[in-house]
Image (spheres, rainbow, N blue to C red):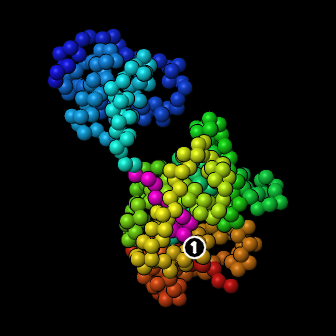
Amino acid sequence: MAFQGCCRRAGGPRRHDPHQQAKITDASLKRCRKSVIPFCLWLSECDVCPVGPELWDDALVEWKNSRSISKSDFEGAVAGIEFLFPRFRGKLAWSRAVIAGRSVVHVPKHTVPMTWRPCTYIAAHFCSDGRSRLAFGLLLQRRLGLRPSEMLALQPEDCSLPEQIRSQQCRATVALGVRTDTKAKRAQAVTLRCPLLIGLLRWAIKTGVKGRPIVGYTCETYRRLLIAAQAQLGLQQLGFSPHSPRAGFATEAIADGEEFVAAREAGRWLADSSLRTYVDLARVAAVATDLELAGVAAAVDYTEAHVADFFPVARVHLFEFNDASKGLSTAPARREVLPTATDIAASGGDEASVDAPASGRGSGAARGRGRGRR
């Protein structure tokens, strides 16, 4: 390597100052260190010890070109180096020029919006697969436009139910960023007015553990299970990700005629540009077409109309929904098999044509308990 010889020079120890570290969270510091590890390993393999920002700058660009580093990994490494070595900030001119030039030609992969209809279909699949809490988290994230980290971090003490706030209206309050803050640099709160989700939130709180997340999944597990659910339902072409419910919240709000500023405030976006990256009406129309071509449109309609039936374990907690619907009995449910999302799709969305197996199990690993009938 051309600059290899001039980089070999002993340097003093490099230690991270604890007061500098105090301004970021432990998770952010962990991500920062993780982003520079591949670059440091490359320096060790090449026996390179750069001294000064110019040689570090040269080494970063050489590392990118020699190892075909992705855009996000390179940006993370540069930001990590600048954080770990504050004197380098503003002096890695070549690396910053490479990032700027790469951003011009880079074609970003936008998040596919998940509207309420396919959200209920995937949630029904999660319920049939024994993951009712994840199904509830998916519905809650879509209804409130939460970020995945916000939804997964919710704990029982972050939520206030109608009986706790003593409101005459059907509403619950959900606090966000209580322990880690949000992008607004302070804790925020959103209001939940959906009777069904208020009842499900009550169920999740009553059956949860104080001080532990309500949903109980990590972001990586959430992403993996969401991809697996789409594959099992034959909808892998949709490309939903953990941010898709938030994008669906933004897109449906604009499609329903909500004012742009009102949608931005409801979703807690700081800038207009941040909201615009999520709004994709054309992709929503394409998703609807994909559901029709896949032959599951009738099944999606069924799950949207009967989403409460897929949560028999929460039946006794759905006070507001029972009062609003007037058609869902609060009596104990009969022991019968609940049709899975796959069963409904196979029957063309006709509930009566779905035959429940005598063994008490749904198709494959999907299982559930039945709906109560008047």
Instruction: Identify the element where label 1 is drawn.
Output: helix
Where 328 sits versus 20, above or below? Answer: below
Instruction: Between residue 339 and residue 226, name the one nearer to us.
Output: 226
| Rendered location of residue 358, percent (x, y) | 46, 85
Quadrant where the N terminus sits is top left
Magenta range is: 109-120
- Number of callouts: 1
At a point 29% along the width and 28% down the height, the residue shown is: 60
Horizontal side, residue 26 vs residue 322: left or right: left
| Rendered location of residue 136, percent (x, y) | 57, 61
At a point 42% along the width and 71% down the height, the residue shown is: 290
At a point 42% along the width and 16% down the height, the residue shown is: 87
| Rendered location of residue 321, percent (x, y) | 70, 70
- Residue 13 location, quadrant: top left
- Residue 89 location, quadrant: top left
Mark 1 surroundings: few (<14), some (14-19) or many (≥20) residues within 10 A = some
Instruction: Between residue 46 and residue 360, name the one nearer to us.
Output: 46
Residue 274: in magenta span: no
Instruction: Please indicate, yes or no, whether residue 157 appears anywhere in the rendered image.
Output: no
Instruction: Please indicate, yes or no, whether residue 52 appears anywhere in the rendered image.
Output: yes
At a point 35% along the width and 45% down the height, the residue shown is: 106
Horizontal side, residue 284 vs residue 191: left or right: left
Tell me which amino acid carries mark 1. Answer: Glu
Where 7 sits versus 34, above or below? Answer: above
- Residue 364 location, quadrant: bottom left
Residue 113: in magenta span: yes
Instruction: Between residue 29 and residue 204, name the one nearer to us.
Output: 29
Quadrant where the C terminus sits is bottom right
Where 301 sits versus 223, above or below? Answer: below
Where 195 sits versus 89, above or below? Answer: below
Mark 1 highlights which residue?
A: 304
Instruction: Between residue 360 and residue 240, name the one nearer to us.
Output: 240
